[in-house]
Image (spheres, coloured by chain):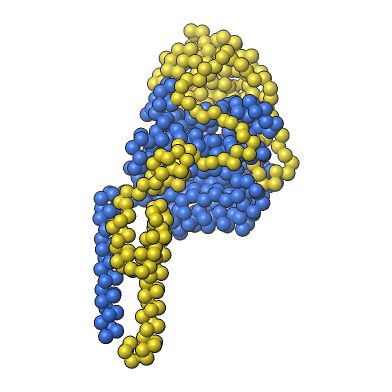
Chain colours: A yellow, B blue
């Protein structure tokens, strides 16, 4: 069938097929080499001219385990990552606000400087689609501080309305103590009074050594839940 | 370990000049230093003007990546006296400390506007997902052909919805829909919502900022995620959000959990396909040659 065509047409068909095959192979190799950060031009050219042979050569040459390197820190990255976990996304640094990274050392706190200023942010009337924070009330200046237990010195600031306490991670104050119930107790602010409630916990709630079902917390009160002792501090 | 495919897209939108959203999706299943963590997925929507929002959201994502993506959390928890096995608490505490850092930075800089960001982040360990969430970005899960919104929006309009004052559709179009009641940064301590989910093959986790969820319905998200691979689905959803609105940055990431196929058989199958392809090509060439004779 092919031979019945004129020789010119035959040549055109053969050349077109060759070009098409070359383009297809080159395109595939180009995309793959780009992902693997290999020499894209070299392999795509080989693929275009040598077709199957070029493809075979590329498949043999490409690394089995894809190795990428972060351009910022030089650490090896997995191929499935498109951002380096050590460096993260880059900021435009417009105003250069420096935020301290989390460190592995325990932070030293000199005294207990409490910031008494309000942290209210007025909500703009026309946000134009941008997320803004609602005007908030002043922070509550009351804490429960761990005096005995796993995390001595840990301060838990009380929430404006209700602060839940328990071993369940959903609690506002999470205490990892087997003797503490998942929902052990709560502190509710009622007309400027700090009311502590026991939520029918298994091992009970004790204030200054005495078991309570509810109690109005005073500055310095020692609250025992399980094997953890917390001190209530108020300003 | 449950294998998964990831897709993620972030877009500045049509009206903003800066993208204050940040996201990360890390597959850590082949990365030994990450310890028990097999994946980290997070979105953050920054706020505060003067690119402070961008700095806050990028900071949150970077710190989460650094802590959990590199395995550094294992050292970090030792000095915080948190049990390493209690991953949900580790995650929550990390977000709490990140909040403190952002707050302190704003105080130090004496920025007139407090900088802040939402964060909705998920940690994957085997087939368990631990979610920590503050703000109005969202996490959805598709399981057994049903999509559910896992997180609760910490927004003023959502509080009205919960009180029955607004319907959720009214909330989507409300002029005050972008006002959040909780975020990372403005306050020294913040209440963080946590969720724990068990995932199985076929499930899809979807995280997005409000720039996307404000203009796309839940059933549309489900249809798109089920019809396309994660990356393509994310592109389509962001494109749709821009077409419908585009006034805000829009970002999303999708994680589709797949069947557990052992790596060795995957490699084997790949090699078989390559050999078959080569064989077909050779046969094809030979066929064309003889046909031309």
Quarter the C terminus of chain B occupies: bottom left
Q: Locate residue A31, reporting x and y percent.
A: 42, 59
- Report which quarter residue A59 is drawn in: bottom left
Point 57% across, 30% down: residue: A99
Question: B94 or A15, which lies in front?
Answer: A15
Question: B194 or A226, which lies in front?
Answer: B194
Point 68% across, 22% down: residue: A117
Q: Is residue B126 above or below residue A24?
A: above
- Report which quarter residue B51 is drawn in: top right
Point 49% across, 15% down: residue: A153
Point 51% across, 8% down: residue: A208
Residue sitting farthest toward the right? A125
Q: Is residue A102 left or right of residue A138?
A: left
Q: Is residue B282 above or below residue A14?
A: above
Question: B234 or A56, which lies in front?
Answer: A56
Q: Locate residue B64, reporting x and y percent.
A: 48, 35
- Report whether residue A176 is seen: no
Tell me how many marks there are. 0
Quarter the N terminus of chain B occupies: top left
Question: A41 or A136, which lies in front?
Answer: A41
Q: Locate residue B291, reporting x and y percent.
A: 28, 83
Q: Is residue A188 left or right of residue B273?
A: right
Q: Locate residue A116, reporting x and y percent.
A: 67, 19
Q: Is residue A81 left or right of residue B243?
A: left
- Report whether residue A127 is seen: yes
């Amino acid at each position: 069938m092919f031979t019945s065509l004129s020789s010119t047409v035959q040549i055109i068909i053969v050349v077109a097929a060759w070009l098409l095959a070359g383009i297809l192979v080159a395109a595939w190799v180009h995309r793959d080499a780009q992902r693997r950060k290999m020499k894209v031009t070299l392999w795509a050219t080989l693929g275009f001219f040598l077709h199957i042979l070029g493809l075979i050569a590329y498949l043999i040459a490409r690394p089995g385990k894809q190795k990428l390197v972060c351009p910022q820190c030089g650490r090896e990255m997995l191929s499935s990552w498109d951002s380096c976990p050590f460096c993260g996304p880059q900021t435009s640094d417009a105003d250069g606000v420096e935020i301290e990274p989390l460190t592995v050392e325990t932070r030293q706190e000199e005294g207990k400087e409490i910031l008494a200023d309000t942290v209210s942010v007025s909500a703009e009337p026309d946000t134009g689609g941008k997320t803004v924070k609602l005007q908030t009330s002043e922070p509550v200046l009351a804490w429960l501080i761990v005096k005995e237990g796993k995390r001595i010195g840990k301060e838990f600031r009380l929430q404006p309305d209700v602060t839940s306490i328990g071993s369940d991670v959903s609690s506002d104050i999470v205490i990892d103590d087997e003797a503490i119930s998942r929902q052990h107790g709560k502190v509710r602010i009622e007309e400027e009074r700090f009311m502590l409630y026991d939520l029918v916990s298994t091992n009970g709630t004790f204030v200054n050594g005495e078991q309570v079902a509810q109690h109005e917390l005073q500055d310095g009160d020692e609250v025992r839940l399980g094997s953890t002792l917390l001190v209530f501090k108020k300003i | 370990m449950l294998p998964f495919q990831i897709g993620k897209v972030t877009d500045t939108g049509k009206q903003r000049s800066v993208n204050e959203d940040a996201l990360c999706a890390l597959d850590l299943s082949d990365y030994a230093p990450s310890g028990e963590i097999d994946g980290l997925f997070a979105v953050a929507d920054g706020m505060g003007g003067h690119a402070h929002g961008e700095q806050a959201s990028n900071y949150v994502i970077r710190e989460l990546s650094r802590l959990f993506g590199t395995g550094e959390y294992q050292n970090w928890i030792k000095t915080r006296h948190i049990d390493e096995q209690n991953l949900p608490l580790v995650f929550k505490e990390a977000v709490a400390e990140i909040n403190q850092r952002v707050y302190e930075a704003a105080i130090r800089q004496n920025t007139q506007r407090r900088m802040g960001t939402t964060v909705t982040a998920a940690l994957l360990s085997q087939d368990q997902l631990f979610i920590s969430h503050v703000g109005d970005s969202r996490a959805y899960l598709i399981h057994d052909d049903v999509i559910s919104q896992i997180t609760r929006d910490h927004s003023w309009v959502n509080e009205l919805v919960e009180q029955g004052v607004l319907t959720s559709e009214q909330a989507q179009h409300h002029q005050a829909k972008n006002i959040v009641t909780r975020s990372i940064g403005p306050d020294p301590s913040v209440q963080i919502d946590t969720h724990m989910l068990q995932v199985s093959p076929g499930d899809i986790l979807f995280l997005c900022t409000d720039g996307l969820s404000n203009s796309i319905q839940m059933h549309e998200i489900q249809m798109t995620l089920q019809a396309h691979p994660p990356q393509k689905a994310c592109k389509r959803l962001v494109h749709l959000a821009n077409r419908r609105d585009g006034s805000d940055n829009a970002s999303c990431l999708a994680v589709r959990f797949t069947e557990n196929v052992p790596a060795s058989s995957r490699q084997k199958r790949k090699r078989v396909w390559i050999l078959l392809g080569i064989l077909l090509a050779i046969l094809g060439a030979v066929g064309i040659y003889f046909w031309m004779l």
